[in-house]
Amino acid sequence: MMDFPLSHAATPSAFSLQSSPTPSCRTCDTVALARAQTFVAFPHAATRRLVRNRPCRARLGRVSSVALWNATPVSITAEAVRVFLKRRVDGGDRVTPAFVATALLWKRAMAEGRDSEAAAAGAGGGGMARLVAGELRELWSMAAPITALNCLVYLRAMVSVVCLGRLGPLELAGGALSIGFTNITGYSVLFGLASGLEPLCSQAYGSRNWELISLSLQRTIVLLLLVAVPIAVLWVNLGPILVALGQDPAITAAAATYCLHSLPDLLTNALLQPLRVFLRSQGITRPMATCSAAAVLLHVPLNVLLVFVLRLGVPGVALAAVVTNLNMALFLLGYLRVSRACELTWRGWSRAALRGLSPVLRLALPSCVGVCLEWWWYEIMTVLAGYLPDPTAAVGATAGLIPATTLMHPVPMALAACVSTRVGNELGAGRPKRAKMAALVALGCAVVIGVIHVVWTSIFREQWARLFTADAVTYFNINTF
């Protein structure tokens, strides 16, 4: 039995094979056997021969060289090809060389993945230590850029608040109220629904189901666009809602103005949030951090131009935030266009994305509930603080507590997103033990990060409280928290 070593193998989705209406014949299927073996052994050199000498007038479509060179190295026997083809021919099926080669390669690759997992599970302490170290490198190579991305997002929000404060106390109060309202009713919902894309894309990427990744992204974008419609209606009517709740009319007017000019951001986030999950599930994280850094660098001059040079005031702050998010999306799309990093996983827009939204929705709704509860507790805590015996000091203490907890978010949020991707990739590749190890490694990292946060907040709690207030009662409350 002769083995053909393979450096690069095509995946089933790497090319398209179109057949003419000519009936199948066993003679041509027999000829296909030899060409299938040639294709398996030498995929690049055999492509032209398959096109030139096509059995049963079958025409081999465009072959993606990127797919051929990026696929998993495997080996396959000529005997395995012969036996498989004979069974298909005897059963009366139409056999094409490309289909046979890629089907066998994929089956063999999955088997080799399970074999490597079993070997790793049986390794000694040294082997397990190497696996854990490798998982740590894999995890943090993804989490570090996502952490930088989260910090940049917080920095953008901080710049907006600083600009609102420069406009005056009324603008600051109205902008802060509007930011809280848009977070509760809009951004948290879109972010949570987009998180439902994570398990779909990560497992599909692990199993190399490129078509499912592309369709899932498109379906999530469609879902977010549909959800953005009622959110936009709510934002347009923010003024009457806040007045009905007893808010100050002047603050309400500033908040309504900010919210109205933030409406285009709903459309941008309906694209940006799923796109981030789509890229993260494929391990493409550094370009996201780079594009976000470029957009945030432009955010400062945008605010200066719109707020202070053109004197647009509150609308200028809102529009600067909208343009910054739009720049992030455009930079990411430009990167994908130039680098062609998602040539396999993006199959173009399809009408099929308008159907089959229920699987995406079943995963998106629980994710949305979890994210919303996590985001909303800040606002709930602030409201409940107003019912305490000394509401001024209590609410002031929450103003000092929330920034401290905000500083704790970037690393755990990045870790949570990346471990979800790692577990999904390993499950999709048929390696449940590696998925379990990835989860345990991330859990250990989370414990270490939690201890670090407890230590720094305990050591610097007095200095932190002095940053926000000189009032003794408020200082005591922040210090106690």
Image (cartoon, grey):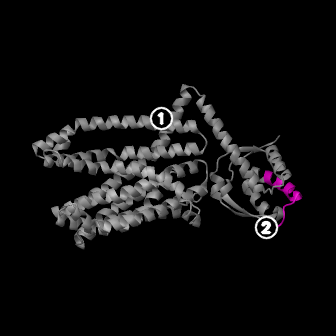
Per the image, the residue denoted by label 2 is 20
User: Does residue 53 appear left or right of residue 321 in this picture?
Assistant: right
In the rendered structure, does residue 21 fall within the stretch colored magenta? yes
Q: Residue furthest bottom?
A: 310
User: Does residue 20 appear left or right of residue 322 in this picture?
Assistant: right
Please indicate, yes or no, whether residue 117 appears anywhere in the rendered image. Answer: yes
Q: Main secondary structure of the magenta part?
A: helix
Per the image, the residue denoted by label 1 is 440
Which label's residue is closer to the chain start, 2 or 1?
2
Counting other residues with Cα less than 10 Å from the Cα at mark 2, is it few (<14), some (14-19), or many (20 or more)? few
Measured from the top left, where is residue 233 in percent x and y?
35, 68
User: Does residue 368 appear left or right of residue 60 in this picture?
Assistant: left
Residue at the spot x=43%, y=58% of the render?
273
Label 1: element kind:
helix
Residue 213: quadrant of the picture:
bottom right
Residue at the spot x=29%, y=62% of the render?
300
Residue at the spot x=61%, y=51% of the render?
208
Depth order, front residue of 315/289:
315
Magenta residues, as a range?
A: 20-37
Identity of the amino acid at label 2?
Answer: Ser
